[in-house]
Image (cartoon, coloured by chain):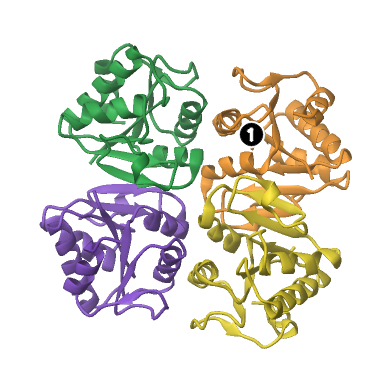
Chain colours: A orange, B yellow, C green, D purple
């Protein structure tokens, strides 16, 4: 089964939330497992979108406690590794979509590009290698293309 | 949702395989997510038992490749951390059952007991702190008890 | 004792090598432990500069083998974690200097800025938060300032 | 340069402390880098013995803070990985000596034996594969033997 990581900040404005939720919904609709960091903001929105579409959502948490996962994470993976778990999110994902985001998201983008994974961007960092798109539909269409 | 880690060697004899498969089945029947290292032997048997009962199975893999997971892992988490991922298996599990096993299993038992998690044992290491049991039914009954 | 991480690509041109070696030398001269990823390019140059100044050099390696360290690493720490070890380099460093670098370096910059560590840049990524400087002397002067 | 990990509990009685200090001293005297978990008890005693013999001592810490290292750690490596850092201690060590110890030490013994590293034991767990010895001198003599 294909996995896509949805990465972005734990605090996000309404527009990013809306984009993330729609990305999550479309991924689930296409039978893709949604991997996130399990917390709030973009992570929660992507999980929520996938959750109500009946999809599988994984939250790879920085802490040791499953209780820290947002309510739409079906499979919580508490790591106790702090931000180091960002590398695990990338490793668990076949490809990734970055939505907004700050330094944590940047570390995930860098890890993903370093290891040759496809990274699609929606209103995120401007880093060479990211495929910048304008809508959730376009993001998911590119993520679904065979690599 | 409650998670139980099923730990044991990647090479196991027929009896251990039978025990692991029955443990997996009973866990899934009780709505518990089965966490394993995702490889063969005891790990595969536990996943198979849970899989055919309709349960959720997570494989926290030592390698970077999802392809290394046994066919009954629904959620593969490739870590690229080698044996260090044993600590992640423990962290992702509310409690654990050890079935047979060699040094890798011993490291998981030690991590689990160190962090105060319940460890039930079936024909495994004789280490103080493990609750030794005689059957899959007894193992799951103890794992389901409130801590 | 203060530690500074010197980060940059494993393949670097002559100018970056010269800069990294001088940074390493100046850090060692000031009694600072030099932390690197232990491999070639900028990492090796920084270690060499520090080594011949009599300094302590630590190489936090992606592989399991000490043999992969460059010859100027006095303390090799093989991690077997691949690129995930980048987070360990940041955690072991009080502050960092980025010299050139590709995506691996970008992941370290992101981790460092995420956790509030000072990052000085020499001909490296243009990311908000990095203190861009023009010479090894300026880099080390800023790294030595009390935070 | 050869590295030896000295592992054991953070709380240890006088006899274990005396043994660990002597092991640390003998290792340093033989030019060996002493790797520990960087905290108190057996770890601190081994570092102290090596420190006053002029040796190099590395502390691979569970926390994010160098301040948590005992005063005889020359090279602190804060990991922020909690007990998971036990695997890093093993990976950084060519061979290991276990002195006393509880579950944390057991996890290190298991990791070491799993990866084929020599483990010498002084009043520690009784696990097949450990070379049990009766004195620091005997421990170090065996650790120094070519593998």
Residue at 37%, 33% in the rendered image:
C39
Relative to C86, A41 lies left or right = right
The residue sitting at 18% across, 60% down in the picture is D27
Q: Which picture quadrant has residue D115?
A: bottom left
Percent x, y of residue B85? 55, 56
Q: Is residue B89 left or right of residue D105?
A: right
Q: Which residue is mark 1?
A: A9
View extreme (bottom): residue? B134
Residue A110 pos. (x, y %): 56, 29
The answer to which quarter of the image holds residue C49 is top left
Whether residue B102 is situated above or below residue A16 in the rendered picture: below
Left or right of residue C112, residue A79 in this image = right
Q: Position of residue D60 (x, y in %)?
A: 35, 53
Q: In the image, residue C10 lies at what x, y percent?
A: 41, 26
Q: Nearer the viewer, residue A90 or C31?
A: A90
> Can residue C23 be seen at all in this image of the molecule?
yes
Judge by depth and name the residue closer to the eye, D44 or A100: D44
Q: Write down the chain letter for disc 1.
A: A
- The answer, for residue C145, to whether it is visible in the render is no
Q: Residue at x 78, y 18 (%)?
A: A134
């Amino acid at each position: 089964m294909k996995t896509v990581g949805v990465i972005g900040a734990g605090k996000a404005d309404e527009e990013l939330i809306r984009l993330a939720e729609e990305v999550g919904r479309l991924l689930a609709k296409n039978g893709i497992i949604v991997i996130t960091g399990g917390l709030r903001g973009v992570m929660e929105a992507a999980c929520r979108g996938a959750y109500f579409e009946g999809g599988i959502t994984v939250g790879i948490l920085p802490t040791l406690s499953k209780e820290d996962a947002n309510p739409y994470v079906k499979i919580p993976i508490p790591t106790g590794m702090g931000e180091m778990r960002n590398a695990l999110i990338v490793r668990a994902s076949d490809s990734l979509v970055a939505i907004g985001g700050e330094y944590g998201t940047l570390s995930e983008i860098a890890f993903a590009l370093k290891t040759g994974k496809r990274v699609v961007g929606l209103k995120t960092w401007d880093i060479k290698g990211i495929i910048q798109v304008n809508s959730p539909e376009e993001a998911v269409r590119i993520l679904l293309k065979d690599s």
